[in-house]
Image (spheres, helix red, strand yellow):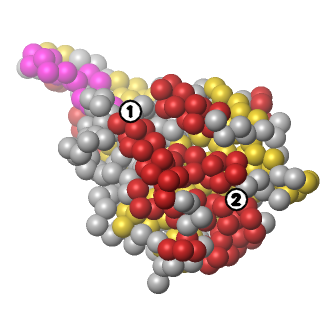
Amino acid sequence: MIDQERTSQVSEGLLRKLVYLRRELHAHPETAMEEEWTAQRITRYLEVLEPDLLLTKVGGTGILARFDGHGAGPELLFRCELDALAIEEENTFQHRSTVDGRSHKCGHDGHMAILCGLAERLASDRPKQGRVWLLFQPAEENGMGAKAVLADPRVSKLRFDRVFALHNLPGVPQGTVRVRNDTFTAAVNSIVIQLKGRTSHAAEPEHGINPAAAMSMIITRSLALANNVPSDPRMRVVTPVYARLGSKDYGISAGSAEVHLTLRCWADEDLDRLQRDVEQVAVEVARDQQLELSIHYTQHFHANQNDPATVDLVRAAVDAAGLELSEAAHPFKWGEDFGLFTQRFPGCMFGIGAGEDTPALHNPDYDFPDGIIPHGIAVFERIIRQH
Ligand SMILES: [Zn+2]
Ligand SMILES: [Zn+2]
């Protein structure tokens, strides 16, 4: 049973304001590192609340606001994301995306509204002790944003006692918060394998080196390395995302190819091993077929490691907020660059239920459910008040 009275310190007026903001952000999606309009909108929202410090252009387009308590105490960081995705929105509601081929399909618009709501609560009722930092991070989806923020000289000198982030979870009932000790999200890397042979007349493939067979062998043998079983601590997910061979010139036998795969494991060390195994496949196949080989990686995400003591703070906050607590049986297979924060500071990422009938993340008809904005604020605020 969810006790609405206890979950929400958020007044009806504030909730209306946050829903309006969330839909405005939804209508103006911007993808990684291009979040200029979004950053300006958030900055304008925060300025009015008079935080003790407001930094802009953090690691690109990021924003960092600080609300100080009355005395010395812990430095707590709460993070949300600014970026949308290159996905065409299928929805037809009034706040639908106004930008072709772009939309908020991961709910980062909602995460921003939650952090703005937390800022409102802190502005009207400062923390007793310590300082609260609110980070609006750019470029989560491509794994670049956390790195850029942490490399910003204004941030790299800071030390946080604990760091927190949440993600909405379609398929999980609204009002349920899902937590987990240790690994919360997978280690992910994307490998790009490029093969170079030699073009020839399509009538005379014997005079060239066509990488078609090598390409299909690399895909088949890499897939054979997979073990897509989330309950297995040694899980390995191999997903072909893109492949290219030759060109649409029917007189030419292909002379080049590339294969792009995403690789996922629960632990960073296991991902290293999987990368080496896929590389070995590529090296063997290229050598047998006399192809030139080049390999590089892109969009790397460290596994997000939750600190058990920090997860306990979230558990207590969920209880105090009157929400349901549920322990995740295994981590989530997506990559999350919040893993870079939890590598440096004790932290916790947790999930809040977005509803059982909500479309999955990155689906073209997904929309963040406004009803869970108070849940996110309630948990974050309880963490601060109880710390
Ligand atoms: Zn996403
Ligand atoms: Zn996301």
The alpha-carbon separation of the residues under discs 1 and 2 comes to 31 Å
Residue located 47% across and 37% down the image: 83
Closer to the camera: disc 1 or disc 2? 1
Q: What percent of the width, then of the height, locates residue 17? A: 48, 47
Q: Where does label 2 land, which residue?
A: 347
- The magenta segment: 244-265
Q: Quadrant of the C terminus?
A: bottom right
Q: What percent of the width, then of the height, locates residue 286? A: 38, 35
Crowding near the residue tagged with mark 2, few <14, some 14–19, many ≥20 C-alpha atoms within 10 Å? many
The numbered dot on residue 28 is 1
Q: Secondary structure at mark 2?
A: strand
The amino acid sitting under disc 2 is: Gly
Q: Is residue 5 above or below residue 126?
A: below
Pointer 1 or 2: first along the chain: 1
Q: Is residue 356 above or below residue 373?
A: below
Tell me where residue 63 sits by quadrant: top right
Nearer to the camera, 116 or 135: 116
Residue sticking out furthest to the bottom: 1
Q: Secondary structure at mark 1?
A: loop
Residue located 19% across and 16% down the image: 200
Q: As drawn, is 217 to the left or to the right of 124?
A: left
Q: As drawn, is 121 to the left or to the right of 179?
A: right
Nearer to the camera, 34 or 299: 34
Q: As drawn, is 51 to the left or to the right of 185?
A: right
Q: What percent of the width, then of the height, locates residue 359? A: 29, 58
Dominant SS type (magenta): strand
